[in-house]
Structure formats: C-alpha cells, structure tokens
Amino acid sequence: MHNDAAFDRRRAALAGAEAGTPVEPSWQDAPRRHKVAIVENLGAAYLPAARRAAAHFFRRAVAPRARSSIYAFVEFQFLSNHEMIETMSDPERIALFIDGANLYASAKSLGFDIDYKRLLKEFQAKGRLVRAYYYTALVDDQEYSSIRPLVDWLDYNGYSVVTKPTKEFVDSAGRRKVKGNMDIELAVTAMEMAPHIDQMVLFSGDGDFRSLVEAMQRQGVRVSVVSTVATQPPMVADELRRQADEFVDLTQLMARIGRDPGERAARASDPRRNQGSFAPNPQPADDAARD
C-alpha cells in the first residue's frame, strides 16, 4: 500500500539535497513498506535529486551502514520498476492458527460452512504462507469420530493438524461434560514460529489469547484476529479485538471462503464423489469457544 507520508518525506529530503539542505541518513531505519512505497512512486524526474542526495551523503562523515544503504537506494533508481519492487518487497510471511472448535462455532452462528481449500488459497494470495495450523480435540473412545474425515483431509491438503484427546468430566450438577481446550498447544507453536513470520492470523475469538497476541507483537509480528461481532452475543472477546493489530469479521470473508450450499447438497446425494473440500463437522465441546 502506498504510504503518502513516507513518500512525501523522502521526496522532500531529496529536493532539499538538491538545494543543498542537509539530509538525515534515515533510509536504513525506514520500515520496508515505506521503502516499497518510495520506490513505487519515485519517478525518473527525481533521479537528479537522488544522485545529488547520494553525493551529499558521501561528502559527510556518516556511518558506513547509512552510506551503503543510501548508495543502494540510488542504485535502485537505475533498475526497472519491476526489479526494484522485487528486490525490496519480499512477500510477507504469514502463518494461520485456527482454533477449530471456535471457528466452527462462529461459522455455525453465521449460518455458513468453511471451505478449507478456498481458505488456504485466500491467504496464499496475500503473501508467502509459511504454515496453516488447525487445532482440534478428538474423542478417542468413539468407534467413529465425526471430525476425523475433516482432520484427515486437512492433513493431506496443506494444513498442519494438531490434535489431542478430549477429557470427560461431570460438573457440579451431575451433567456429563467433554472438554477439549487447545489454547496451550496453539500458544506454544505461535511463540516458536514468531522469529519466522511477519503476520499471524488467528482464527478465534477466545479472550484467553489476548496475552499471546501481545507477546507476538513484542516479537515484531503483526496479528490479525478473525472472528465475528455480527452475532448476539459477539463471538470475539472485546479484549482480544482491542489487542489485535487488525480485526477481520468472518462476514467479510464469507463470499471468499464459504462453501456453496448447493455443493454440500450435491455431495450429500453422491457419496462416491471425490471431496475436495470439507465443511466442519461438529467439534468436541470447548469452553473457550463460548468465551
């Protein structure tokens, strides 16, 4: 995205250099997105000013690191625009962290099914998708688990699936409960991945993840939270939404990652058809999905 402020500052600096005004060696410290905006928008008309700016820098006793960075900047001016952008704008490294039970509950509350093949393609188009993690608990003592076909399909189609057995307990009212909370597993993996990614996309509205989001931000990772406020009550905790760098409502993604209802009916009527995508089956009970 074009950053007008960054571009204007650099243009003013180059113009100042042309007029003999001192220029500060701040290029090395500028964020990459600002550099990309500058290179995208700095036309040939500014090449003389760029050359003069470089000469001005080299006449000053500036740090070698700043001098080399300005030299590189001027060199980029002589490359084609395509080459400049390729050199300076490496794709953003993205990792998806999907709280299976929470995402299922959110999608169900909005009345649509997730097409996991389309979801993967959606984020592959946004940058370099390093990993797509899917977390869910499984009931081990059942002869057939309704979630198993989805888990198997995800495992073979680009997702890293993390599972653990559910725990059964009886509450104070004597009711049988099944719990399958994957918060710790997700948090540990996210912290391990922090040095290797630029953006974390968290598919969950669980407020317990607020501290994780803050920790990831301290590591320099931008965090997007995907959930919804379009239900009553909202599926995302307010503190998680406030902490995130970006909040994406599932309603904004429905058209791009939702499954065609007609396709679901067709698959149900033809069990021999190869299933290229799955809608989430009922997930194990998870207290975090309702936080």
Image: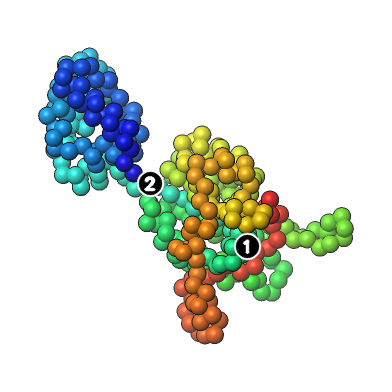
> Image height check: is 195 above or below 179?
above
* Count of marks, rendered view: 2
Give percent across and percent down for residue 238.
62, 44
Residue under label 1: 109
Badge nearest the viewer, 2 or 1: 1
Tell me: residue 75, above or below residue 1. Answer: above
Residue type at mark 1 is Ser
Q: Earlier in the sequence, mark 2 or mark 1?
A: 2
Using the rendered view, name the quadrant where residue 209 is placed.
Answer: top right
Inter-mark Cα distance, 2 to 1: 32 Å
| Residue farthest top in this picture | 61
**Side of 15 relative to 239 (left or right):** left
- What is the three-letter code of the residue carrying label 2? Glu
- Residue located 57% across and 40% down the image: 242
Q: Residue at x 66, y 74 (%)?
A: 144
Instruction: Tell me, for residue 18, which label it has, or none.
Output: none
Q: In this rendering, does residue 97 appear at all?
A: no
Q: Position of residue 95 (x, y in %)?
A: 46, 50
Mark 1: few/some/many CA within 10 Å (<14, 14-19, 20+)? some
Marks 2 and 1 in Cβ contact (< 8 Å): no
Where is residue 100 shown, x and y percent of the image? 59, 59
State which quarter of the image contains the N terminus.
top left
Say which residue label 2 marks. Answer: 92
